Each structure stands twice: as C-alpha cells, then as structure tokens.
Amino acid sequence: MSHKTDTLETRIRPSVSHGSTSSLESIASHQPQQLHQPIRGSSSSLESSDDKAVHPIGLSDDLPARRASVSTAGQSFQSLRTTSIDSGRLSRIASAYSVHDIYGQLDDANIALRRTASRTTILTTLSQRVQLELDRQESRQTHYLRKDQTGSQQGPKDETGEKDQEGQNDQYQTNQDAWDTPLYSQIPDVSVPTKDYGAEFADADPELVTWDGPDDPDDPRNWSFSSKVVVTLVVSVYTLVSPMSSSMLSPAIGNIASDIGMTSTVATLSISIMVLSWALGPLLIAPLSESDYVGRRPVLNVSIWVNFAFNLGCGFVKTPAQLCVLRFLGGLGGCAPMNVGAGALADIWSDEHRLVALAAYSIAPTLGPVLAPVISSFIVQNKSWHWVFYVLGIFNGFVAVVGTIFLRETYLPKLLRLKCQKLRKITKNDHLHTIFEIADGETTWGKISVQISRPIKLLVTHPMVLGLGVFMAFVYGFMYLMIVTFPDVFRGRYGFGVGIAGLMYLPMGIGYIVGTVFWTYAIQKIYVRMANNNGGVAKPEYRLPCLCFSGLGIPVGLICIGSAIFSFSFIAVFQTIQNYLIDMNNRFAASSIAAAAVFRLCFGFAFPLFAKQMYVRLDYGWGNTMCGLIALVLGLPFPVLCLVYGERIRQWANLRMDREQAQRDARNLERLQRMQVLG
C-alpha cells in the first residue's frame, strides 16, 4: 500500500494563544497564524452558505501536527517543520479528542452550534446519498419501461421521434456503468450507508471516532498474521463442535433406543432435531452479532458454552423426550459459529486472502459429521453409550476454555464503540461518538424484525437465492441421508462390526479434504480467467461454472454409494453457492447466506426422517438411484440456466432489494433529521 508523505513545514504555522470567539461568523473566519484554531478553512456562516447549512471545516490542515504532539503547542515547531512524516501511518493521539484541543476556548453556546452543524452535515450527506440511489433506480426502471414500450409499438417513426430516442439511448448508455455498479451493493452489511465506517466524515466532525487511517493497528485487518491465524483457528474449531454433536450418537442410537425405549422414528428424530435448531437459531442470534453493543465474540463464546452444557447433559437422560429437548437446545446454542464465523473471518482478512481462510473454515462443518461417528463407534464398542456424550462434553469444554481465552472481538462497529468509550474516559469528552451512534436511525425492534424477515423474504422473492438454495438444500439433505443410513448399510447389510462400520465414514472425510483443496483453487482460477477475458471486470456468475461439474459427481456418488465421490462434489456445490451469494450483493450477503442456510438445514432435518420408510419400500439400491436421478435433474440444467440468465435475474432482483433498503434508510435518516431539528 502506498502512502503519501507530507512535510510538516507546509502544514504547520507558528502558534499563538487562543482568542475567544462569540459568534459562528468569528468561528468561520479563523486567523491563519494560529496553529490550534478549532476551525480551519474559509467556510461562511449559516445564513450566507449556499445550501443553508454549515459545512464544518475539518482537521486535515493541522492533523499531522496534532498527531505528532499536541503537547508542544506552546513551544517552537522548528524541529517539526523539517520532519517528513508518512501521514498514512500516523494516529490521532488520545488528547487530540479533548474538548479544549478541538474547540479551543470557544464558549459552550458556540460549541453546541458547532456540534449541531457537524451532525447536520453528516445526516444531509447521507440523505443525499440515499436520494441519489433512489434516483438511479428510478432512472433505470424508467429506461426498461420505455424500452419495452418502444419495442411493442408498431408503425413508422418520424425523424424527430427517432432523434429523441437516440438521445435517450445515448443518455442511458452514459449512465449504464454507474447503474450496473449500484452504490448499495458496495456498502458493507451495516446499518448506515457508508463504505468506510464513517471515516469520510472525519474532517467534518472532529468528535467522530473512526480508524486513524488505513494502517490503524486497532483495525482487525491490520492485525499481525499470527493474530489472524489464531482467530481463524478458534472460529474454525468452534464451528467443528456443533456438527460433531449432530452425528456423534449415530453409531450409538441402537443402544440408546433399547436403553431408554425409543421407536426407530424417534431415534432418527433425536439425531436430526439438532439440524432443525440450526435453521431456527440464526434468525435470533445473527442480529446480536451484528450489533455494535454486542459483536461477534460474546455471541460465539456464549454459544460454545451453551452447547457444552447441553451436550454433557445428554449423557444423563432417562427418557426420549429429555434427549430430544436437550439436543434441540444444544443445537440452538451451537448454531452461532456456523453462521457468525464467516462474518468474523471477513472482518479480519482482506479480499485477496479471504478465500483461503474461508476454505479452511468451511471444511469444519463438513468434517464434523464425518469424524464424530468414527470416534463414537469405537466408544460404543468398548464403553456404554453415555461415554459418547461424556467424551463430546470433554472436547467441547476444552475448546470453550481455549476459545474464551484467545478469541478477540473482530466486529468493526463494536471495536469502534470500544475505542470511543476508551477515549471518553481519557479525555472526559462525553460527546465523542461513532457514525453508528449519530446516523443509525433504525430502532432496536426494527433491526430485529429486518434480520428475521429479510432472509425469508430473499428466499421467497429473489429467484437466484431461491434456485440456488433449493439445489443446495437437496444436496445437503442427501448428505445427512447417507450419514444416518451408514450404520444400517454396513452393519445390517454387510455384517461389519461397530468399530469397522464407523471407519466407513472416513472416505467421506477424505473427499471433503481433497475437494476443499481442489475446488478452492479451481473456483478462483476460473473466476480470475473469466474476469480477465471480460476486460478485468468480474461478475458473480463467474463463480458458477464449477457447479456444472458437481452436477455429475453428486448423482454418481449417490447411485453407487460412493461417499468420497459425493463429498468431493458436495464441496463444489457448497463453496460455489456460498461465494456467489456473498458476491451477489454486498449489503445483503449475510441475509442471502442465512436464507440458503435455513432452507438447506430444514432439508437436512427432514430427509433422515423418511429414510427408513423409503429404504424399506425401495431398498438401498433403488432408493439411492432415485435420489441420484433427482440430483441429476437439478444439477445439470439449473447451473446452465444460471450461467445464461443469472446476471439479468440477479440485477433485476437486486434493484428491487436496493430500492426497498434505500427507502428504509431514507425514512430512518428523515427521522433523525426531525429529531435534530426538535432537539
């Protein structure tokens, strides 16, 4: 990263004592001889400004001096004048946030005016941005309507009409690039429409707490490589625990059923009910992790401890109802890492390094259901079924202790809030704030309702989310179908012992590992090549070609019960769709992933429930053949349709979602502006 180097000689002026000011006009008309004047520039007064609002002048003129040392204000700056400082790596020291350093000796009335003007500037700028987005969407929609109407008209056109149409087409073509890169698709999934967590307003509001430049060491993306690796490992192991819990009792289910009196249907339910809780839990837990009051770390740590408590409790159950209830509650606790973990890794890794980190993370939820039966099969062979849960609880508890110690908070809005709270204590300036504290007009219940309803709405109304979600859901259901039927196939049909039958899960695990390595490389390689062929412009659809290859591997793996072939192809489906949903619209990435997750987890819960009846009627050969044919019908035509028509469908659906979000942001900002006027 290159940084612009500035010499302080051009930006530092001799220091003189502060003079008192008593009006907004005197604030604006600063004297250039003063180093620590609170206002810089030549802004006019409230009455004389063109837009009838004060535009506060920032700290950019004297920020290097403030960062170097505010304490030298009364001393000579001769040494600083010849010092060359890399301004991109400087941090604004804590004392620079004090009221005296920002406003000098202004009286309380003028300070209040200044703060009001700064906040008004920010809200006005954000409102204009939202309105620009609404205008852009209206222009594009109008163009499409006009194009459809023109195409349907018959008969000759006069020369004037043709010229008007040509002019309209030229105007549309001029704005096409801007319309095809919507502002809202570039904004992170945060509650304020700003791309850099408020840093763009640092000059307008000196009491706004943001990152101190692109290399601020407190920014998670600037952490050391070892710190990032530790967080990645902790989150990945957290994500491993809950999937292990889901299938750990599969080899022991016969012993458990005979001991506490379960029917075959209830026994299957006790295995898959945890998957159902994974589908419901994120709708409540995800909003907490994206709150600047809570963040990722508390959600992940509480989740792993809740999972530990209920997993251990399963070892003491006496009735089927107790087992099912504890499994369901344990799943609610354990679902957080599988949904919040990807966001935590996105917080710390840059775009170019994120793919490898996400690949390492994504292998955990696929390896968990495979490793657990291998371990538990040998436990059941030598101990009672209670020890399955005791061993799981010991491992879960160890992971919880280590993770609680070493996991750091990664959510940027939460870290900014913590930084702001620390600066308030140091400077005694209670008016310091983050962009989310002054520009987030969403109410608490509004945030919760959006987080719960948006994934469901995307699943129902967004064709790409629905289509890809259906395909992933069927594949995920087939995976759990294989997991729960392995004991019956290899012990009942082939007469293997409990321990040896458990080893039959290992080929599936090998397929997951090899598939993760291969498809991570292949997906990125194809994506980059197609982007280069398109003039360096990447599109989300460039993630989808590998989906076509998996459309052949999944049916083959199901028909021949080739678990390694199936799991190898499963990784292609999982990684391709996950990456596409992230790239599809940055503002709604978390909701898109949650929508697909809810769908696939419901299938993962339901498929094992009818497995027994299906295989009794069709036997394993024809039963798996039927599943393979379903996978073939979904896996071949659908990816091709997505490649051909996916871009147009995505743009149409995204435009509607962006418009609804812009309208919501406009209402929230309007509410804040009304409160600003009244208050």
Image (spheres, rainbow, N blue to C red):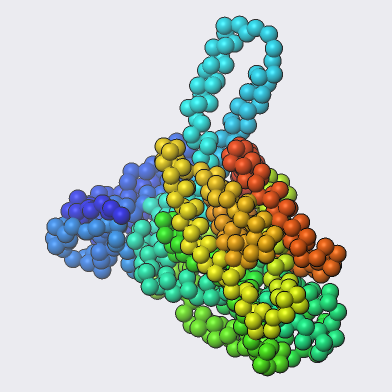
**Residue 609 at x, y = what percent?**
80, 68
The tally of labels here is 0
The residue sitting at the front extreme is 494
Q: Residue at x 60, y 77 (%)?
A: 371
Vertical arrangement, residue 198 with respect to residue 406, above or below:
above
Using residue 627 as the reference point, say whether residue 570 is left or right of it.
left
The vertical placement of 364 against 581, above or below, is below
Residue at 53 percent across and 49 percent down: it is 543
- Viewer-side residue, 180 vs 472: 472
Q: In the displayed structure, would residue 279 be above or below residue 132?
A: below
Image coords of residue 280 (percent x, y): 72, 66
- Given residues 439 and 35, the one toward you in this image is 439
Q: Position of residue 147 (x, y in %)?
A: 63, 23
Q: Can I make out residue 556 in this image?
A: yes
The furthest residue to the bottom? 383
Is 631 left, or right, of 61 in this rendering?
right
Position of the C terminus by quadrant: bottom right
Question: What percent of the width, then of the height, locates residue 54?
Answer: 44, 45
Quadrant where the N terminus sits is bottom left
Residue at (56%, 14%) from the top-left corner? 164
